[in-house]
Image: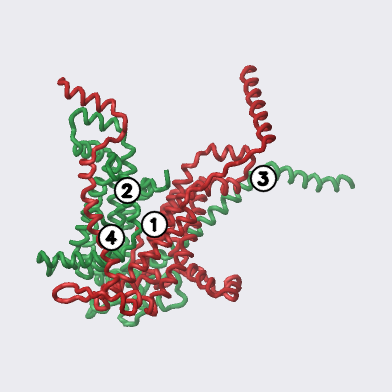
Amino acid sequence: MTELAKNRTLKALTGESRIENQNKIAYLFILPWLLGFLAFVIYPLFQTIYNTLFKITTTSLGLVYDYNLIDKGGNYGTAFRNLYFFPQMLDFVIMEATYVPTIIIVAFILAILLNTGVKGQGFFRVIFFLPVIIMSGPITGILYWNGAGGLLTYEDNVIFKMILSYSPGFAEALAGLFANFTMVLWFTGIPIILFINALQKINVNLYEAARIDGANNWQILWKIKVPIVRPTAFVTAIFTIVQLGTYTGNPVFYLIQNSIYDRGAGIGLASTFATIYSLVVFLLVGVAYLLLGRPERTKKIQLSSIQRDRMEALAVRRAKAKQRTATTR
Amino acid sequence: MNAILVKPRAAVAAAKTYYRHHKSRLNRIVAQVAIYVFLITISYVFLYPILRMVSISFMSASDLVNPEVDWFPTKITFANYGVAWTVLKGEVSLFNSIRYSGLMAIFQTIVSALTGFAFARYEFRGKKLLYTILLLSFIIPVPILLITQYNMFNSFFQSIGWTGEGKGIGTYDAQLVMAFFGQGVNSAILIMIFVNFFKMIPNDLYEAGKIDGANPFQLFWHITIRLSLSTIVVVFLFSFVWNWNEDYVTKFLVGDGILLFTNQLGKFDSLFQTRTTGMTHPDAGGEIQLVESFKMAATVVSIIPLLLLYFVGQKSFVQGIEKTGITGE
């Protein structure tokens, strides 16, 4: 064996880091993705934002850009003056605000129930995951418009009427939720799997320890399960927010789609709609982060000196007891 | 006298002790039953649109308007499926859907595997930043990118003279290019599945391979790919299904250029008028209501391939979501 090869082998065998530092090769592997990302995500993102400043007309020579932000607020002005855009954006935000929490809560409840070890867990999972496979624009569209999505008759419900008389806006949001309750459930397919996965990863010893300390199931749910699955809830929230963005039942769906399609009205205006819409989506993700995503601050418990003494005494007593049982055995 | 009094008391006491002894067991049974009732109810709500759709797809026009017929048609008719197949141009669109979803899935799987390998195996400059960007790219709404992507591809295809029948915009070319560069549907999730699986492959294997003189591409091919066939199947299946169901981007970049199940289903009503003229179908009524059963039959037809795939690869799908590792570890 030559000296060089020996050295190399030694280096390979004694290499400390599991992962090695090979910039060139790594970049070679991610090159296609990186190029695609720059060309089809980064560039379009900034180009579309740039587009919002111009009135763009399509001519035989290509696209002609006329700066028009000064003229009555340009595209932004037009978007604000549009009769449908902002009301529909508001509906969209209301939809996200009602759907996302519902989806997370329902998915969490179903995951907990499936995780109790009921028989036929696999069967229920198959059913709950099925919509993920078949859900596409046209299909949800058809089922949505045929009212197959609505199952519960809520209009005659006393509670609904009470809410309606107090706060019509809230009642409307609720109605939107219940009229499409099945469709809402259809979004829980992936969240359920994620939650089950997260629940199964909780160390069983934690439950045991809690039980020894006298916690009941309810306390275990709130003190152990909920805090541990919080990061999963955040991922779920983001996933759902994004999914609802391309959902046919989404109120702004058609407006944005048609504005892109209708090239006569101008690419500038379409870009403006898309940009404002994206901003709103980012804001929603931000809200989800504030509510669920922030790392939880661990509370430091301040013990008084008496408490500390007591605990120390207890620890000593326990250690002694342990010793005693060990020796008697 | 006493005996009579004592007896009921004894009975009550016996019942009380019985209850006390079997309390936890009784509670458990009640809880189990409650869980099953709840899960079955929810399953019904999940499946309601699908069941409804299948039921309607077998109904004749008279059943549709008959208020007495709710779930079961008076006479099961398969004629709706014949009409649906004609309207969808089933023989063409089925082939196209399979072909393009398959192609896109192959491209996406290859690029995701390459990218995932780099992120899992190598330490390179900007890795953390790039991985964060990869995850963040998932939340960028589609419309804001789509506007510029369309313009880009439009001018690109025109500049290289790739226009006309079966070329450029109106075909799958643009989407294939994007998929090849790792920007297909939900590419970020697919890459994440690979990253998390590749991380689990022990480093010793690579070291052994390196000692035997394998270069990085040989390591990738002979170790990583050989070991992750199941993951590759998972990613391929997901990619296939998502591409099959994708219709937002397809609507702009493909439009009506290629007959697919999704885009045919999306405008079923208008196609129904043109494609069934001169054809004798069972309910030649012409009322709008009567399209219902054909439409439902068409929807059933378009999801049958997906259902077949789901029931074959059901485990893979669920595992795939678990493998993303986005449940936070």
Q: Earlier in the sequence, mark 2 or mark 3?
A: 3
Residue B125 rendering spot, x and y as whole percentages: 27, 43
Mark 4 closeness class: few <14, some 14–19, many ≥20 residues within 10 Å? many
Label 3: chain? B
Compute the Cα span from label 2 to label 3.
57 Å
State the mark number for residue A60: none
Observer-side mark, 4 or 3, equals 4
Question: Which of B327/A270 is in front?
Answer: A270
Left or right: B157 as drawn, with respect to B70: left
Residue hosting label 1: A130
Give above or below for A224 relative to A47: above
Residue hosting label 4: B244
Label 2: chain? B
Q: Are marks 4 and 2 in contact (CB under 8 Å)?
A: no
Task: Name the amino acid, label 3.
Answer: Lys
Query: The chain coloured green carries which letter?
Result: B
Residue hosting label 2: B129
Task: Name the amino acid, label 2.
Answer: Leu
Q: Are marks 1 and 2 in contact (CB under 8 Å)?
A: no
Q: Residue at x 67, y 28 (%)?
A: A313
Query: The chain coloured red carries which letter?
Result: A
Q: In the picture, which quadrant includes the C terminus of chain A?
A: top right
Q: Residue at x 44, y 64 (%)?
A: A96
Residue hosting label 3: B23
Observer-side mark, 1 or 4, equals 4
Mark 2 closeness class: few <14, some 14–19, many ≥20 residues within 10 Å? few
Observer-side mark, 1 or 3, equals 1
Compute the Cα span from label 4 to label 2.
32 Å
What secondary structure is marked by label 2? helix
Q: Residue at x 52, y 73 (%)?
A: A169
Farthest residue to the front: give it.
Answer: A70
Instruction: Say if labels 1 and 4 share a chain.
Output: no
